[in-house]
Amino acid sequence: MHEKLAAKVVAAPEVEGVSFADLGLGSNIVETLSNLGADAPFPIQAATIPSILEGRDVLGRGRTGSGKTIAFGAPLVESVLTSQAGKRREFGRSPRAIILAPTRELALQIDRTIQPIARSVGLFTTQIYGGVPQGRQVGALKKGVDIVIGTPGRVEDLINQGKLDLSDCRIAVLDEADHMCELGFVEPVQRILRQTREGSQKLLFSATLDREVAALVDEFLVDPAVYEVAGEDQGSSTIEHRVLVIDHRDKAEILSSLVDREGKTLVFSRTRAYAEMLAEQFDDAGIPAVSLHGDLNQAKRTRNLQRLTSGRVNVLVATDVAARGIHVDDIDLVVQADAPDEYKTYMHRAGRTGRAGRSGRVVTLITRQRQRRMTELLGRAEIDAPFEQARVGDDLIEEIAGRMPSDADLTA
């Protein structure tokens, strides 16, 4: 992060007793948040909502699962509603706000959270993303929407076709801004933001904020309020990290043993082909599993994710791009079948568990040859994880899978 952008750190004790109403949100929105299970604000929400309602640009950093979607979504809805007070919402109206996400999964997840909040006050959202025909999206825009949630590629495409007009957009949000930059979306995002109303409010939220978002921060954010969540260090985290050093020939059997369990498990693979192979391997072993990767069409991706969230299967094997934006609160084990190549990928994967204060465990499988690289990666991520030798049938595997108590459980 820029040195000039000193962040205000907000800790959980500071927000005890604070309600969403105290932060300036209206009664309909507060009630809807309660129905969504958000009875009281998380630290990132308590910190950013007042600044957003004041109209300030905001830069927010918090680990995945810290509540960023409500942190920008609820005040965005309130602000759009306020800006339209006393005005008729006309048929074919242009959107007043746009939210950009790096992947369609994340765009869909954001909409699932924001749509009921918007509907509670009579506002409408629509999703705009690639991989599906644009007809339904264009149809929604013709009728008129208040908030657009989409990915940069399709959004820019519809702008160029003259089917999306952002000139009346008063608020623009970038979620997972760092990942947007990693995927090569910096220039499309810049072009999109330049289409919004002059002086529009800009909100950037991400798990990490570093030099990769510098160009966006420098051009678009004016005197931003900068926040990050305290207690993101490992000492106060609810996530346990472990590294298993294995022989490559044991890998398939160890993976099957790890995922043969009661709780929900997310397995990360580097390639689409390996994700498919592992899902088939688990199925063959009598462990229902589905995959999530870029070769699947949107309907299949949505269906496979729904099978996990509904509990019809307990194992999802995913690649990194497809898994961005997965929001399943009760994933309590993340298994990295392929170790990540860089620390931000590790942080993103780890953020799929331990969400909203729940406990979780991240287990990475490596061979002996990779121990040095893994040590360096964990050092950059500021994570202390034990390296443990593991073989097929070890009690260690049984304990991680939850089929026998850990040493901590026995001494508790």
Image (cartoon, grey):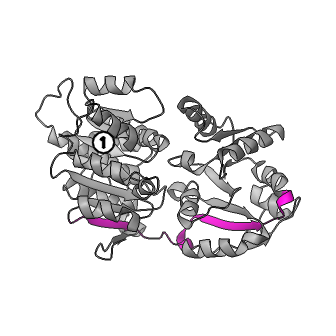
Which of 406/196 is in front?
196
Vertical relation: 9 (above or below) 117: below
Vertical relation: 253 (above or below) 238: above
* Secondary structure type for disc 1: helix
Which of 363/86 is in front?
363
Q: Quadrant of residue 88?
A: top left
Q: Quadrant of residue 62?
A: bottom left
Q: Which residues are magenta?
A: 223-250
Vertical relation: 356 (above or below) 154: below
Q: Is residue 360 in sight in this rendering?
A: yes
Tell me the crowding category of disc 1: few under 14, some 14 to 19, or many 20 or more residues within 10 angstroms, Cα based: many
**Residue 366 painted magenta:** no
Which residue is pictured at 15% across the width and 49% down the height?
198
Q: Is residue 358 in sight in this rendering?
A: no
Q: Tell me where residue 381 appears, x and y as whole percent.
A: 55, 71
Type of amino acid under label 1: Ile
Q: Tell me where residue 298 appears, x and y as whole percent.
A: 53, 32
